[in-house]
Amino acid sequence: MASRLDRSQPGFVEHLELDNPGMHTTDSVDYGIVIAGEVYLELDNGEERLLTAGDCVVQNGTRHAWINRSGKPVTMAFILLGADRVVTPDQ
């Protein structure tokens, strides 16, 4: 039986790392803009960047997670452009 998430967003679960909640990689170029509030972007190497209203981030198939530590809502706008992942020998 398909979960509610599978039914509402088919294929989304395949991008999540179930053993590392929140961490995921997409096959897309992602543009994210913080409209209101603040959110941390956790990168593949464990580094974090605090993004606040007006900040923009561009990712190209980057492994990452979004973390809201403020206890307040954050509003973001995303544009995702589909891409084909190219795996290089060092990955």
Image (tube, rainbow, N blue to C red):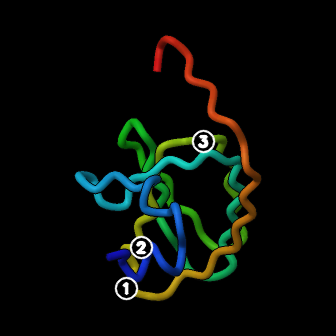
Mark 1 near mark 2, Cβ–Cβ under 8 Å?
A: yes
Residue named by callout 1: 71
Q: Position of residue 24 (x, y in %)?
A: 44, 52
Name above or below for residue 87 compared with residue 27. above
Name the residue at the top extreme.
89
- Mark 2 belongs to which amino acid? Asn
Residue named by callout 3: 61
Q: Nearer the viewer, residue 58 or 85?
A: 85
Q: Position of residue 80 (x, y in %)?
A: 72, 58
Query: Which numbered disc flags the more N-terminal residue, 2 or 3?
Result: 3
Mark 1 near mark 3, Cβ–Cβ under 8 Å?
A: no
Which image quarter is the N terminus in? bottom left
Rate crowding at label 3 as few (under 14), some (14 to 19) or many (20 or more) other CA atoms within 10 Å.
Answer: some
Residue pictured at 50% horizontal, 11% vertical: 89
Cα–Cα gap, marks 1 and 2: 7 Å
Residue pictured at 45% horizontal, 45% vertical: 43
Query: Which numbered disc flags the more N-terminal residue, 1 or 3?
Result: 3
Cα–Cα gap, marks 1 and 3: 28 Å
Tag in front: 2 or 3: 3
Tag in front: 1 or 3: 3
| Element class at badge 3 | loop
Residue named by callout 2: 68
